[in-house]
Image (tube, grey):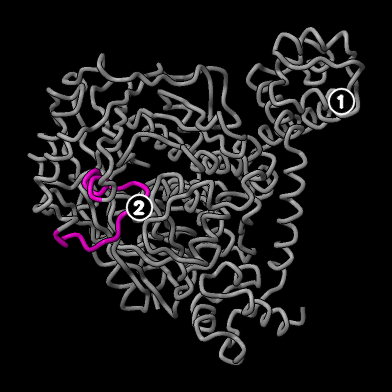
Amino acid sequence: MFVLKDFIEIYDVIVIGGGHAGCEAAAAAANMGSQTLLITADMTKFAAMSCNPAIGGIAKGQIVREIDALGGYTAVVTDSSSIQFRMLNRSKGPAMWSPRSQCDRFIFSIEWRNILESLPNLFFWQDMVSGLIVENESVVGVTTVLGARFGARSVILTAGTFLGGLIHVGLSQTYGGRVGEPASYGITEQLVAMGFEAGRMKTGTPARVDGRTMDFSVMHEQKGDSEGHFSYMAKEGFILPQRSCYITHTSIEVHEILKEGFLKSPLFTGVIKGVGPRYCPSIEDKIRTFTDKDSHHLFIEPEGVDTNEYYINGFSSSLPLEIQLKALRRVKGLEKAKFFRPGYAIEYDYFPPVQLYHSLETKRVENLFFAGQINGTTGYEEAAAQGLIAGINAHRKINSEAPVTLGRDQAYIGVLIDDLVTKGVDEPYRMFTSRAEYRILLRQDNADFRLTNLGYDLGLIKNERYNRFLEKKRRFAELCGFIKSNNVAADTVNPFLSSINSSQVTQSRKLSDILLRPEVRLKDLISVVPELRSRVGECTDLQMNEILEAVEIFVKYEGYIDREQQTANKIKRLNEIAIPENFDYSRLKSLSIESRQKLSKIKPATIGQATRIPGVSPADISVLLVYFGR
């Protein structure tokens, strides 16, 4: 048994890895009061953007706003480093609106370090962890490559792509978690020896190109929005100068050149064993899969405000260096391109997440939590969300408090974690709006309404922010009430309706009836009915726009929102029917053999969770309901 003298120091929580998951985990645990140690190999690369220099996107943007509403920092850092903001899917319904920011990836890491070093309970050790110290099936500390031993009441493993990382460029291989950074060994082998199941996954990244060697004049310029932000505490305007992205495309000639390298492709020759992301394939995978496509879009994205480095989004590749360069120089605008770095693929170890509870604690080792890519996910946002929840629950576990789990109707984060631990993964998991059955409830505009109270109760939201949120709720409720209960005269509103080519009214109508028209915007209606502006009260333009957007969406979609909430409430009742943790499913002979096997492996905590396990049929659920008296 280890005692105090065996360790340099003992902490409440140790976080292994300084990526997006590790940063959020360490910050959450420290802010909740745990003495926290963050161990990372390179303190200049906190939350490094190893792949594309952007945060957000379809469904991912919703996750970032949820992290912010809970008191995490990804949104704050994004706003501080944003060089282009865009709200995607504006042409669709509000359930699909998704914020995305191009970031200066260097400033992004610096801002994260500034935040982390400002937290009183958070401490650092620059090193690599070589093993876990486990006693009586509970983690009690870690060992490092430099020979240090640290004690811990809980440990969060967020190793990203570093566990057994193997980099491929053509048939050349090198060990590493990122280019120029060593891979980590020892932890996977130790966990497998303890009974954990491990696997291999693969991801890739495109070449980085010198912007001075590109001709942007022949590309399509893609500018950002004139305003926008992620954090609910954001101030007016952008902090950094805004940069454009550009769009170009491949061609048949480019594809033919790329095919020349297929015989030396580690992806096609079987050298790469790991499973890659279906929704972010390499350019060679696209060519082989979509044989009918003569071209694919490439998005040319700046890596920062003070660099000529550009990211060629859409050109992820592990083909030989000379093939990558030859093909890219046949792309319009890139004829004279020079590489900063070629694209490469990386294989790494992961642990199937069905080995976790919803708290992200492992089932085999107590007080050990996994978060990020080692759970089989891909993406900064998915990793950060897991890190936040792991940090919260590591702190709560050692303080004998119940774990925090988010429902599928409560947050995309809840959908993400439930999918991982219930269904598992057979390829890198990426969040999409289509994965959520309650998309109308889980909009990017209402993440604060859904989660700020919880963040405050957890101690992650400070009083100043909470009071601002309560004031927003008050203004929202007052404006909604006014719109639903007050009329506007025909002669007052008709000139406005005519100006937007909307049919006139013959008598006074409820303001809500006018607002229900698709072509009517609340911010325009304010100029017609000044009382609306007075109901918002004194606030900044940014705050007013937030309130107006929230009210307009609620009024226009209230019927759909209510209907979806009723459906969620019905499903929620199944989540209230608990299943004992060590229940013996072999006793229920009425269950199918597949169902018994799946239920025994995953050990769902509730009937609701059991319904989402692949292979468990409605008939099997009926058996469980009968057995448990419902």
Which corner quadrant holds the C terminus? Answer: bottom right
Q: How far is the residue under mark 1 from the one under mark 2?
A: 48 Å
* SS under mark 1: helix
- Tell whether 519 sits left or right of 388: right
Give residue 442's position: percent from left, percent from top: 63, 44
The quadrant in which residue 471 appears is top right
* SS under mark 2: loop
Q: Earlier in the sequence, mark 1 or mark 2?
A: 2
Q: Which secondary structure class fits the magenta region best? A: loop
- Tell whether 348 sits left or right of 481: left
Highlighted magenta segment, given as a residue range:
269-288
Q: Is residue 303 visible?
A: no
- Indicate yes or no whether the magenta region holds residue 270: yes
Q: Nearer the viewer, residue 382 or 441?
A: 441
Q: Nearer the viewer, residue 256 or 268?
A: 256
Q: Residues within 10 Å of mark 2 (few under 14, many from 20)?
A: few
Instruction: Name the residue located 43 percent from the left edge and 39 percent from the top edge.
Output: 117
Q: Nearer the viewer, residue 308 or 331?
A: 331
Give residue 279's position: percent from left, percent from top: 37, 48
Instruction: Name the residue located 50 percent from the left edge and 57 percent from the top edge.
Output: 390
Closer to the camera: disc 1 or disc 2?
2
Find disc 1 in the rendering and name its residue: 482
Instruction: Name the residue located 37 percent from the left edge and 74 percent from the top edge.
Output: 196
- Tell whether 196 sits left or right of 460: left
Q: Which mark is residue 233?
A: none
Identify the amino acid type marked 2.
Answer: Arg
Instruction: Name the residue located 20 percent from the left edge and 36 percent from the top edge.
Output: 207
Identify the amino acid type marked 1.
Answer: Phe
Q: Is residue 405 visible?
A: yes
- Indicate yes or no whether the magenta region holds residue 523: no
Find disc 2 in the rendering and name its residue: 278
Give residue 543's position: percent from left, percent from top: 66, 23
